Image (cartoon, rainbow, N blue to C red):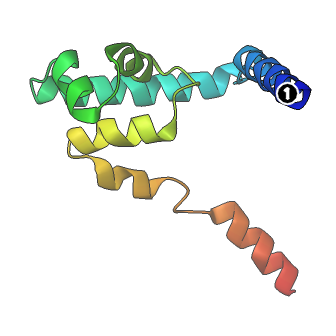
Amino acid sequence: MLFIIIISVIFVENKQHMKTKRNIVFPKHQEMLERVGENIKLARKRRKLTTIQVSERANIDRSTLYKIEKGTSNVSIGSYFNVLRVLGLQNDILKLAADDEFGRKLQDIEML
């Protein structure tokens, strides 16, 4: 019984610690996230979809969609993907990190 209580306390402490942990995003990169959010918002408006429609179809809270459209950094990539899917833009996710020019240069230097 004592073991279960100790495990429960550790679990609660870890969960509280996880809540206080924040993503640190530099201002330049935050601007990029905000542009992505704005692009998603514009795509939604072009399709004449409300936030309620998109959030229901993406199976997320309206507040999460609001965070995505604002470029908040603590939203999961799964939520972004579901919104892109609802908007018919799911293939755009394949463009992320597709052109790794820097990585190819590092690989080429290693070959020399």
47 over 64 or under it: above or below: below
**Rendering coords of residue 5 (x, y %):** 84, 22
**Rendering coords of residue 75 (x, y %):** 52, 27
* Foreground pick, 53 / 5: 5
57 over 68 or under it: above or below: below
Q: In the rendered view of the protein, which quadrant contains the N terminus?
A: top right
Quick check: 10 left or right of 63? right
The single residue placed furthest to the bottom in the displayed view is 112
**Rendering coords of residue 11 (x, y %):** 78, 26
Quick check: 77 left or right of 73? left
Type of the residue with mark 1: Met
Residue 55 in which image quadrant: top left
How many marks on residues? 1
**Rendering coords of residue 67 (x, y %):** 44, 17
Residue 35 in which image quadrant: top left
The single residue placed furthest to the left in the displayed view is 48
Q: Which residue is mark 1?
A: 1
106 over 27 or under it: above or below: below
Name the element at disc 1.
loop
97 over 76 or under it: above or below: below
Q: In the rendered view of the protein, which quadrant contains the C terminus?
A: bottom right
Tell me what residue is drawn at x 84 percent, y 29 percent. Answer: 7
* Foreground pick, 67 / 100: 67
Tell me what residue is drawn at x 29 percent, y 23 percent. Answer: 41
Quick check: 43 left or right of 8? left
For label 1, the crowd category at 10 Å Cα-Cα, with few meaning under 14, some 14 to 19 and many 20 or more, is few
Tell me what residue is drawn at x 44 percent, y 56 percent. Answer: 95
